[in-house]
Image (spheres, grey):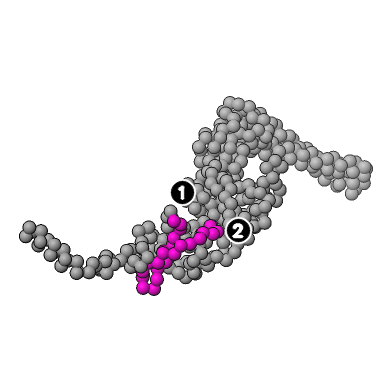
């Protein structure tokens, strides 16, 4: 009974002592990363599928017909001017010998006619030969010169055909496909290999006519891949739509080095004209069952929960209401914050 009375007395004494809150007990400030809200020109966007392509993607064809002696393997990396296929041109080599022999013969004939003209010119000055004989010799010399020029042209043509028996790379790249194999017959104009340049990449997409009004050459667009958001710039818009889909081709230049041709992605195309809004990074949004909150940091480095309405989203930025341009908003560490809680502020990765 005495112990019970002592316990009651102790409770009465403790009841007179005020409780101390965690906030006033010297609890450490919560570390957060903040950025400043900014006024931006944003527009709502629609995401369209796109793909990465090479600006240099060619099916290399044989310029001469013949049996293939060599074809580059799939995966072979070649530089501009390297041989990717070789055609059997032995018959052309023999024809070249024949053409060169004709040139030699025409050279000899021309030299004969030149000597004949010189001889007759001397005789004509002494009236020892008729003028018509000299005229005929001049005609023969002129004809011989023409025949020599024609023979030399035939040699040049045959040499060019020999050179075309070697299929060379017009640009540096990788052989991605063998369209004919060694030993097969390749006709003039038949594709032999496919060569792709993986260093000159761009993005290709097809968009409806309604979106063309908000695009022009030089417009920067967001690109979404599995690795995250990147950026591209409109290089050109093809002003002719596809007959079936009624879509228009758009090409974008990119600076990403680790993409590959054939990779799929999405591009963000504006659906309205841009307008001035206050925007914050998406990381500043705290999504809860009762709505969306952004934590604003007051001048005394305490957190203030602001309920916001969301608007235009573009890339990593999103329009919010209730936040002013220049306000410091939390982008990391806001999930466990409460209004009035003191914080330790880091701005853009550096301690404030």
Q: Tell me residue 131's x, y (percent).
A: 92, 44
Question: Label 1 vs label 2: CA separation?
Answer: 22 Å
Furthest-left residue in view? 2
Which residue does the numbered mark 1 point to in the structure image? 227
Comparing 118 with 318, the one in front is: 318
Is residue 224 shown above or below 31? Answer: above
Which contiguous range is marked in magenta?
290-314
**Residue at left offset 16%, top offset 66%:** 12
Secondary element at image label 1:
loop
Would you say residue 101 sits in the magenta stretch? no
Would you say residue 291 sits in the magenta stretch? yes
Q: Tell me residue 342's x, y (percent).
A: 33, 68
Most common SS among magenta residues: strand
Which residue does the numbered mark 2 point to in the structure image? 219
Which mark is first along the chain, 2 or 1? 2
| Residue 239 visible here | yes
Q: Tell me residue 53's x, y (percent).
A: 57, 45
Q: Tell me residue 332's x, y (percent).
A: 38, 60
Is residue 188 shown above or below 116? Answer: above
Query: Relative to residue 345, is residue 95 drawn left or right?
Result: right
Q: Quadrant of the C terminus?
A: bottom left
**Residue at left offset 48%, top offset 67%:** 323
Q: Quadrant of residue 87?
A: top right
Furthest-bottom residue in view? 299
Query: Relative to residue 316, is residue 110 drawn left or right?
Result: right
Q: Quadrant of residue 104?
A: top right
How many numbered tags mark residues here? 2
Query: Relative to residue 102, is residue 221 drawn left or right?
Result: left
**Residue at left offset 60%, top offset 26%:** 184
Secondary element at image label 2:
loop
Comparing 82 with 279, the one in front is: 279
């Amino acid at each position: 009974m005495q112990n019970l009375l002592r316990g009651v007395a102790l409770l009465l004494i403790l009841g007179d002592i005020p409780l101390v809150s965690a906030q006033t007990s010297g609890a450490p400030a919560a570390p957060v990363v903040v950025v400043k809200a900014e006024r931006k020109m944003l527009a709502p966007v629609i995401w369209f599928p796109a793909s990465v392509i090479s600006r240099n993607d060619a099916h290399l064809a044989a310029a001469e017909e013949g049996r293939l002696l060599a074809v580059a393997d799939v995966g072979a990396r070649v530089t501009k001017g390297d041989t990717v296929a070789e055609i059997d041109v032995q018959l052309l080599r023999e024809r070249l010998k024949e053409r060169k022999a004709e040139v030699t013969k025409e050279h000899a004939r021309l030299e004969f006619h030149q000597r004949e003209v010189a001889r007759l010119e001397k005789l004509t000055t002494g009236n020892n030969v008729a003028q018509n004989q000299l005229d005929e010799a001049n005609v023969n010399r002129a004809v011989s010169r023409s025949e020599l020029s024609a023979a030399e042209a035939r040699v040049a043509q045959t040499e060019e055909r020999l050179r075309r028996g070697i299929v060379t790379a017009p640009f540096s790249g990788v052989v991605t496909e063998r369209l004919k194999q060694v030993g097969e017959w390749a006709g003039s104009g038949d594709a032999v290999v496919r060569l792709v340049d993986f260093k000159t990449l761009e993005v290709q997409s097809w968009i409806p006519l309604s979106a063309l009004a908000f695009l022009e050459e030089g417009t920067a667009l967001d690109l979404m891949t599995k690795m995250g958001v990147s950026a591209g710039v409109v290089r050109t818009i093809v002003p002719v739509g596809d007959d079936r889909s009624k879509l228009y081709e758009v090409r974008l230049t990119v600076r990403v080095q680790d993409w590959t041709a054939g990779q799929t992605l999405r591009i963000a195309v504006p659906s309205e004209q841009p307008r001035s809004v206050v925007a914050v990074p998406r990381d500043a949004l705290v999504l809860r069952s009762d709505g969306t909150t952004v934590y604003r940091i007051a001048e005394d480095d305490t957190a203030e929960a602001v309920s916001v309405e969301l608007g235009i989203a573009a890339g990593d930025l999103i329009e919010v209401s209730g936040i002013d341009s220049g306000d410091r908003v939390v982008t990391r560490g806001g999930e466990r914050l409460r209004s009035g809680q003191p914080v330790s502020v880091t701005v853009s990765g550096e301690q404030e």
